């Protein structure tokens, strides 16, 4: 967990994209073909313009009246810059496509052809060795320890620990038992299982997702569609303008040169956004995929950016999901040491996170029972998922040292409670549990027991009572700890005007304490499975766009109803079907990143569109004054004082190179901090709007300066 | 040069208009939200009679299609009536001066011109039209076209605001516009004008025997005050006389000049306030008002840069600055009434005048100005709104691809209907018939003609010299397209939005001053830049060539 408050959205976990330069180059040139280009209206028109000017360069007399034979070099230059403009556009597409193919192949590497052991007989004694490709839905498989699961399947017999790190990036193993889904590509680390293949090889979950990522026939997202329409509209406006100027120029004999007019036309067309729009969309999906989030529809990315309400499960998203002992409270005549030692001993073989945390706390506070100091080093017996037990035998007596950090080792290996396995009689009778339950069992209850317990539990903590030999020693305070970094993320989300809502099955007190701690204003406590769905509906009825993350079957209706539903890869199939995104890492906290990425994609589109349109101001002022040879008096408008040829070529070159210059922006997305929407807006307006008006003046002047001094023309 | 006196005039006029409009918009809200008011006792029975005669059900809620259909049918019907009256005025009563029938092309042009709230006049009212024509086709259409504008505004508001089921009932809006707004207001205005010594008479032209023996002068009086009132109030602009508000009878003095100026600003401004009131957020209305008035002030500032000399065609009664302010105001509010001859002005004044007609929302004509402003808002919200990191929204509803498409078409229609006929005019040499050349002056005059027609402004250089078949027919068509294509499209947008889901929060606050500033720049870039090359060939070229005064 990072504790960074900033959002490092582009997290390239995959090996750096190997961009096969030659392939990209070839692909970008292949895309110059009008057959492929026609989908991009703006660039298609630029290509037509290139053809017209090319004809003029070859033989100006083919286009009389608006060309002159002495200008063939100039026409050639214009034609070259025009085709470069188109090529830069196809290049950006090719790079974006190459990136996403690269990401896809990284994902696909997980799903190689692997050997499988197919169960042939009912009694599980006959097997056939096949490969994953030969499997069919419904086949039974035996997967043993250390083997790779060949395909997505459902466990029907056995319990095993499964390493899904290749799929999800999560290093801890996951326990899978009958009814659980194991994903193809994960590795069985303990025991063996019998599982039923749940998909045909070509339609594994991962395969389907990768295909979605890769498919070149991605439907346009709503905003992409609207921008495309806007661009067509602008193209139409400029086409009318240019044709009118052409007609007037000829009729009124204004000394117009078609190449200059075309230069004006192409400069005015929203070429920048036209060129980069597809790349922005693809790179958005790519960035999501690099974060191991697979988008099932582009629409969902935009909806993510639009989110108003974020439904957060307390457990797993906000808190670690396990209660940790944080304090020993002695009662009556007992001391803290008594409580700590008893907790240590009673929890020694307790494999629950609570138990482990008690051992840790006791160890940290130096409350390890004396007996342990004289016991020998324990030899660990490996944990088996099917017995859910592990053991330890004792070696020669020496100083007992708990492994450094305690927790790491204890996490996977368990030792038996009885540190002296030979003596069966001397079992220390320590019990711990809920205060009410313990109260029934013990012989004596301290004074004011109930009120002390209530007092301790007031701020949402869980209280356990520990008793030894029928006598209550004290209380253990446990708390579900907030994940590091969550608080700052929540505050970022709130800064952006998104309302986080926490949902938990806990008691009111716990819910209010946790939500107060992380700064969430709204929460739902004592939630039942169906509460999530109701909450989604309620928020939507209030005119909000809801994002949520879920894993269980009972989350499926809520996932389907929400505007942005993220299912975890480890979750159930119905949940994944219902969601519009799947998180391969199964990290619920990532929902916040998804929202940020959605916003970033929308912003990038808006920024490049605004920039592209704002650019036109400068181009008008550069080209229009030199456009009509018969009207030299217009030079009064020529604020950059450029000669006609240099003005036209410089404007065109600027128009062309701004595309590759912005490719990194298109692929990475605009940088932003989680601030209020209006502040982000203002910043973007200044950078891309005002900057978009001013930059071309400087850029064109600089290019003109270079051209003049390098004497290219 | 801008003098403190000019600034004072502008601030006093705008200030008092804004103040009155703020109050008046409350009345408009009551009129169009069909709330019960004390005035129901006066107007209610009149309206009930009208509904009964017309056979309309005032409780029917209309979608955009039926609203548009009703609007188009009614306007077409009215235009045809006006056309017939003009065509046959010679045989119709109320023609004491015995003017002959108007030619078919001029009748066509005039009927379309007045029914589209343009009031482009290719005739000289005082010497062409009978009293019946003046009242039954001209003045009648000035009321109905203004009412149509108000209807369009409230219908589009209802749709975009989305608090109602449909866009309202056209017949109710229309009747109420006339009965409760235009007739009472123009009645009051006409009385004030009469008080300020503008004539109102039906007794034929007065013959004035001058001191010179035997010589006499015809004083063309008539129902002038009432026409003046509705011509300004309804942003019509078609005057009783060809010389419009420059005629000493129509606009006798400085006081009437300022009064008429304020009168044409009143309703377009009130409608902008009405938007805020209907939306339940005066701040949303504030955005529109600040944006349109800023553009208006920019226009005036541009026009006042050159020192405009009193030249032939200007009225010494008002002085140069006052004439310039009138011209810019009249184009900014797309009224088109004139208190001087356009040919007299500096090219920069013409440039400023053209800005108003290109943008059409500075604040634009009655009703439609607000409608165009909303078109710009939708486009601007979409273009820049994404930069706030959210699908752009306006008043809680998401701007979708269909809205963008329609708004772009509405926006696009303006340059098309201006540029295409301008090019055709020069291509077939039609400008020669109107006595124009192909230089910047000739170009400006033709370009201005179609811009004015498309913007439903009505001011022009040509005047009665535009009375050729080409210009009559072409501008007639342009005026109707320029009027009803954007209306149809904006009604469609409103109709699509009215039932769309509304969201509680929005990222881009359209009621903020930041957005207002962005909107102003966006309008300038979108509208003015579209026409930049043509402005360059016209007024800008004239300016650079050193024309100080006159075209």
Image (spheres, coloured by chain):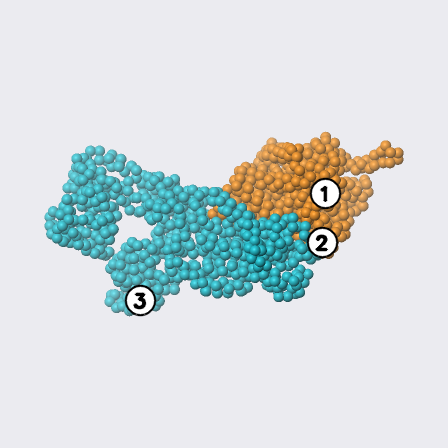
Which lettered chain is shown in orange?
B
The mark found on residue B549 in the picture is 1
Residue A526: x %, y % from top left: 33, 43
Horizontal side of residue A340 vs A71, given as left or right: left
The mark found on residue B425 in the picture is 2
Horizontal side of residue A519 vs A691, given as left or right: left
In the image, is residue A221 above or below residue B308? below
Residue B441: x %, y % from top left: 72, 48
To the question of a shared chain for discs 2 and 1, the answer is yes
* Mark 2 and mark 3 residues within 8 Å of each other at the beta carbon: no
Q: In which quarter of the image is the C terminus of chain A?
A: bottom right
Within 10 Å of the Cα at label 1, are there few (<14), some (14-19), or many (20+) other Cα atoms? many
Who is closer to the viewer here, A584 or A657?
Answer: A657
Q: Which chain carries label 2?
A: B
Q: Which chain carries label 3?
A: A
**Chain A's shade in the image?**
cyan
Q: How far apart are marks 3 and 1 (CA)?
A: 92 Å
In the image, is residue B157 above or below residue A447? below
Who is closer to the viewer here, A512 or A664?
Answer: A664
* Mark 2 and mark 1 residues within 8 Å of each other at the beta carbon: no
Q: How far apart are marks 2 and 1 (CA)?
A: 26 Å
Who is closer to the viewer here, A179 or A22?
Answer: A22
Residue B94 can be seen in this image:
yes
Tag nearer the camera, 3 or 1: 1
Check disc 3 and report the residue beneath it.
A115
Residue A46 can be seen in this image:
no
Q: Which of marks 2 and 1 is nearer the N terminus?
A: 2
């Amino acid at each position: 967990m990072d504790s960074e408050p900033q959002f490092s959205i582009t997290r390239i976990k995959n090996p750096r994209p190997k961009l096969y330069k030659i392939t990209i180059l070839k692909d970008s040139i292949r895309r110059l073909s009008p057959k492929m280009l026609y989908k991009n209206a703006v660039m298609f028109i630029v290509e037509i313009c290139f053809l017209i000017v090319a004809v003029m360069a070859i033989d100006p007399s083919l286009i009389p009246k608006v060309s002159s034979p002495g200008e063939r070099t100039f026409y050639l230059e214009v034609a070259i810059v025009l085709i470069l403009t188109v090529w830069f556009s196809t290049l950006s597409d090719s790079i974006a496509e190459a990136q996403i193919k690269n990401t896809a192949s990284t994902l696909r590497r997980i799903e190689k052809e692997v050997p499988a052991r197919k169960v042939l007989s009912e009694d599980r004694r006959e097997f056939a060795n096949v490969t994953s490709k030969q499997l069919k839905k419904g086949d039974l498989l035996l997967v043993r320890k250390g083997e790779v699961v060949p395909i997505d399947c459902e466990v029907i017999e056995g319990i095993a620990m499964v390493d899904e790190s290749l799929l999800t990036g999560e290093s801890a193993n996951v326990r899978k038992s009958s009814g659980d889904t194991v994903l193809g590509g994960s590795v069985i680390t303990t025991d063996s299982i019998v599982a039923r293949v749940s998909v045909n090889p070509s339609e594994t979950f991962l395969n389907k997702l990768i295909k979605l990522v890769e498919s070149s026939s991605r439907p346009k997202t709503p905003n992409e569609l609207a921008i495309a329409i806007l661009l067509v509209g602008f193209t139409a406006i400029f086409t009318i303008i240019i044709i009118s100027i052409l007609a007037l120029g000829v009729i009124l004999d204004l000394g117009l040169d078609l190449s200059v007019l075309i230069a004006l036309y192409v400069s005015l067309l929203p070429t920048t956004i036209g060129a980069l729009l597809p790349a922005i969309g693809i790179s958005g999906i790519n960035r999501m995929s690099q974060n191991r989030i697979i988008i099932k529809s582009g629409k969902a990315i935009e909806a993510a950016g639009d989110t108003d309400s974020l439904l957060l499960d307390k457990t797993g998203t906000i808190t670690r999901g396990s209660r940790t002992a944080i304090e020993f409270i002695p009662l009556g005549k007992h001391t803290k040491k008594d409580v700590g030692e008893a907790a240590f001993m009673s929890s020694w073989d307790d494999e629950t996170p609570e138990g482990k945390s008690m051992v840790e706390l006791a160890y940290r506070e130096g409350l390890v029972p004396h007996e342990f100091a004289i016991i020998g080093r324990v030899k660990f017996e490996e944990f088996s998922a099917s017995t859910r037990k592990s053991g330890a035998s004792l070696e020669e007596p020496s100083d007992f040292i708990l492994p450094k950090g305690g927790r790491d080792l204890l996490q996977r290996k368990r030792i038996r409670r009885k540190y002296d396995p030979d003596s069966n009689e001397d079992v220390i009778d320590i019990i711990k549990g809920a205060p009410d339950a313990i109260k029934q069992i013990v012989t004596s209850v301290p004074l004011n027991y109930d009120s002390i317990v209530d007092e301790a539990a007031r701020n949402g903590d869980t209280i356990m009572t520990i008793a030894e030999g029928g006598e209550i020693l004290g209380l253990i305070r446990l708390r579900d700890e907030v994940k590091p970094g969550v608080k700052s993320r929540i505050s970022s989300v709130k800064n952006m005007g998104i309302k986080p809502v926490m949902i938990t099955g806990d008691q009111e007190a716990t819910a209010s304490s946790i939500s107060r701690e992380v700064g969430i204003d709204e929460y739902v406590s004592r939630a039942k499975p169906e509460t999530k769905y109701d909450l989604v509906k309620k928020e939507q009825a209030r005119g909000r766009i809801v994002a949520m993350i879920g894993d269980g079957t009972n989350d499926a209706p809520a996932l389907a109803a929400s505007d942005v539903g993220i299912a975890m890869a480890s979750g159930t199939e119905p949940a994944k079907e219902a969601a519009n995104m799947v998180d391969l890492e199964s990290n619920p906290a990532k929902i916040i990143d998804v929202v940020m990425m959605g916003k970033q994609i929308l912003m990038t589109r808006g920024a490049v569109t605004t920039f592209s349109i704002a650019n036109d101001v400068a181009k008008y002022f550069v080209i229009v004054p030199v456009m009509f040879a018969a009207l030299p008096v217009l030079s009064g408008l020529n604020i950059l004082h450029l000669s006609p040829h240099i003005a036209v070529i410089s404007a065109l070159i600027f128009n062309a190179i701004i595309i590759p210059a912005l490719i990194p922006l298109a692929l990475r997305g605009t940088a932003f901090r989680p601030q209020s929407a209006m502040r982000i807006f203002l910043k973007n307006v200044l950078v891309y709007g005002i900057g978009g008006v001013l930059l071309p003046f400087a850029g064109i002047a600089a290019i003109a300066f270079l051209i003049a001094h390098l004497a290219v023309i | 040069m801008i003098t403190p006196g000019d600034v004072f005039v502008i601030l006093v006029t705008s200030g008092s208009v804004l103040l009155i409009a703020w109050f008046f918009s409350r009345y408009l809200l009551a009129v169009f939200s069909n709330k019960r008011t004390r005035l129901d006792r006066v107007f209610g029975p009149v309206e009930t009679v009208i509904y009964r005669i017309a056979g309309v059900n005032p409780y029917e809620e209309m979608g955009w299609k039926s609203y548009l259909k009703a609007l188009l049918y009614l306007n077409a019907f009215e235009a045809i009536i006006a056309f017939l009256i003009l065509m046959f005025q010679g045989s119709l009563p109320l023609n004491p001066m015995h003017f002959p029938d108007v030619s078919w092309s001029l009748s066509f042009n005039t009927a379309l011109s007045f029914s589209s709230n343009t009031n482009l006049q290719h005739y000289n009212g005082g010497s062409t039209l009978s009293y019946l024509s003046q009242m039954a086709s001209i003045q009648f259409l000035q009321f109905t076209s203004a009412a149509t504008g108000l209807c369009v505004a409230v219908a589009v508001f209802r749709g975009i605001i989305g608090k109602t089921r449909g866009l309202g009932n056209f017949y109710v809006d229309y009747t109420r516009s006339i009965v409760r707004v235009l007739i009472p207001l123009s009645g009051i205005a006409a009385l004030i004008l009469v008080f300020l010594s503008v004539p109102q008479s039906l007794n034929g032209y007065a013959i004035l025997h001058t001191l010179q023996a035997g010589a006499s002068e015809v004083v063309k009086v008539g129902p002038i005050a009432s026409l003046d009132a509705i011509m300004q109030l309804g942003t019509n602009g078609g005057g009783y006389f060809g010389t419009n508000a420059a005629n000493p009878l129509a606009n006798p003095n400085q006081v009437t000049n300022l009064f008429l100026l304020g009168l044409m600003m009143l309703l377009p401004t009130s409608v902008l306030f009405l938007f805020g009131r209907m939306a339940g957020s005066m701040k949303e209305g504030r955005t529109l008002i600040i944006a349109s008035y800023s553009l208006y002030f920019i226009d005036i500032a541009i026009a006042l840069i050159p020192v405009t000399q009193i030249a032939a065609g200007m009225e010494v009664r008002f002085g140069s600055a006052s004439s310039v302010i009138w011209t810019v105001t009249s184009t900014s509010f797309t009224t088109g009434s004139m208190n001087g001859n356009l040919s007299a002005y500096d090219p920069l004044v013409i440039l400023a005048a053209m800005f108003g007609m290109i943008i059409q929302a500075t604040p634009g004509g009655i009703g439609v100005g607000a409608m165009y402003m909303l078109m710009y808002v939708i486009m601007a919200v979409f273009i820049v709104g994404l930069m706030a990191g959210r699908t752009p929204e306006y008043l809680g509803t998401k701007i979708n691809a269909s809205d963008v498409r329609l708004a772009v078409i509405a926006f696009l229609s303006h340059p098309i209907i201006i540029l295409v006929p301008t090019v055709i005019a020069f291509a077939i040499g039609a400008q020669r018939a109107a006595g124009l050349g192909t230089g910047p002056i000739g170009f400006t005059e033709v370009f201005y003609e179609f811009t004015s027609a498309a913007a439903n402004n009505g001011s022009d250089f040509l005047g009665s010299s535009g009375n050729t078949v080409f210009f009559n027919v072409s501008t007639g068509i342009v005026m109707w397209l320029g009027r009803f294509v954007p209306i149809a499209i904006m009604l469609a947008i409103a109709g699509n939005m009215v039932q769309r889901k509304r969201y509680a929060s929005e990222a881009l606050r359209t009621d903020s001053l930041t957005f207002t500033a962005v909107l102003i720049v966006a309008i300038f870039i979108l509208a003015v830049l579209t026409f930049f090359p043509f402005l360059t060939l016209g007024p800008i070229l004239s300016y650079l060539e050193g024309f100080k005064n006159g075209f």
